[in-house]
Image (cartoon, coloured by chain):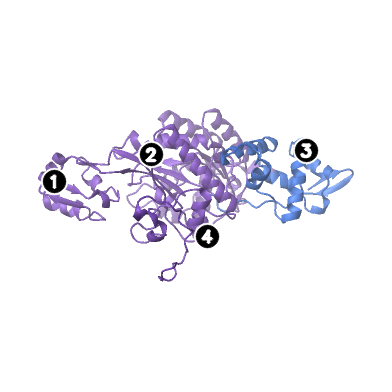
Amino acid sequence: MAIEVNGKMIEIDEEGFLVDREDWSEDVSEAIAGRDGIELKDEHIGLIDYFRDYYEEHQVHPTMRVLVLRLGGKIGKKFHDHKEYEKFLYMLFPSDPISELCKLAGLPKPLPSEHDG
Amino acid sequence: MAKKNDEKGTTNPELNIPLLNELEEGQWPSFVSDLKQWSKTKPQVAQLLNQLEESYENRWNYWTGTVLNVSGYGGGVIARLSEKADKYPDLAEFHTIRVIPPPGFVYSTERLRNLADICEKHGAGILQLHGLTGDALALGFDNEGTFAAAEELMANGWDLGGSGPALRSLQCCVGQARCEMACFDTMKTTRFLTNHYISFLHRPELMYKFKIKVSGCANDCANAMIGSDMPIIGTWRGPMQIDQEKVAEYIEEKGVEHVIDNVITRCPTNCLSLKGKQMVVDNENCVRCMHCINVMHKALKPGKDRGVTICLGAKRTLKIGDTMSSVIVPFMKLETEEDFQNLTDLIDRMWEFWNDNGMDHERIGEFIARVGLATFLEGCGIDPDPRMVQSTRTSPYIKFEELAPGLFEGEQTQQPKVWNREPDTREPSD
């Protein structure tokens, strides 16, 4: 499967993750977002940049916990109040924020939780 | 993918299940009989049985997991794909939806019929009420069916939640609604906590799963002590209630030998004795195990000052072996608004410390085992207490002399220092 960005064909897998992570550019992420029906605005792009920086530093994508703590930590005093920021993330990316952001930032696909039950 | 969708619902295969038929024998009701009956209506159920038969034959599990989320939710759907999708096209997507149950699992038949209708309309129509997870599980949805069923469930007042590294659906026993032993209102507690932490049920964020179960007394009908990270169990302080007339009646009816054999000698801490036809209880040594109350339920009752004990840390084997819970809050009242506020404060503090310092896929019990109870208590701002023991009356974590030096001379003035994990030599230090 491939999508066309600026006249160049970019290889992606079934779910939309980049096959070659070197292919990433802002236009590519916009094209993938368009494929998933998301219009990229400033909030989205800021989060994508954060994901790329974080991955470069830690070699692992940020978890929801990290996002809520680092970016939403200023909201409220109690642990319970941080949850508001998560709601905001789900508003931006309704299906699955972490997986969607990894996709748009050109990071590897996050592994599903081993023990669901 | 499109090709598989075309094949869906067309093949209704012959059942070929000699091994599963064995499970129909015996006196007990069998899931095989039910599913066989149901497979006449739903082709995927026949395929499901055939695949299970194949699994039994080859001793191999053909399910694989994936991630599927309803819009705005991070949990609630457990996505399962079959590796045998070529052979069984209807099992290519066979997802499970977790529906949050009402407290105490009490449904009206109308609501239950509504749930069943929705699940039958969009999926295989198999309900599992209730797993050890406590949810109402609806099985057998494909991708479109999952979204359609979720929409319709929510429109009818149901809610999904409790899968992945999140707070799981809460469970409780029937409590004061139906039971004379209950020491606090379990259903109110469950409902309050579900509503308060509903975001944590919908959207996973924790290190790993966290289960809260609520039992009204130490009989523990909700299996809280073994099956949840944080059991909340009803108990009482002070003396238990004794109606000596009823005790005398019971002795006359059953005989002294019966009472001695079944009540007095069965007390784990030997704190019961008979004085003529009167029962004498050594309340200071009573561990509130409920045995005597269960046997002589007319004569004996839990005490009047009732509340809850909060424990922490039961889990199945993952990083360390199976554990049962141990006490974290020996006694607290759970009646007023303020008490519930205290409870959520406690949970918030524990979650915060666990999530800040825990490792990925680490249950809270394992976290405590790794960092030590002393560190955990300090991190959560909970005062250490001699009653925080793993096995009651045998192995205290902490040494009494080290913990409470000031108590012997009246009130405790100095805070105990952090004690050594390994108690060293007995030589007096200056």
Q: Position of residue B229 (x, y in %)?
A: 47, 49
- Residue drawn at the location 51% of the way across and 53% of the way down: B376
- Residue drawn at the location 72% of the way across and 47% of the way down: A102
* A2 on left or right of B251: right
* B241 on left or right of A94: left
Tell me the element at label 4. helix
* B64 on left or right of B56: right
Mark 1 residue type: Gln
Q: Indicate the chain coloured purple by its letter.
A: B
The reply to whether residue B273 is in sight is yes
Q: Indicate the chain coloured blue by its letter.
A: A
Task: First in sequence, mark 4 or 2: give its number.
Answer: 2
Characterize the local packing of mark 4: few (<14), some (14-19) or many (20 or more) Cα atoms within 10 angstroms.
Answer: some
Mark 2 residue type: Lys
Alpha-carbon distance for marks 4 and 2? 30 Å
Q: Would you name the residue on which mark 1 appears? A: B278
Q: Would you name the residue on which mark 3 appears? A: A34
Mark 4 or 2, closer to the camera: 2
- Tell whether label 3 touches label 1 (CB within 8 Å): no
Tell me the quadrant of the picture where the C terminus of chain B can be found.
bottom left
- Tell whether label 4 touches label 1 (CB within 8 Å): no
Q: Chain of mark 4?
A: B
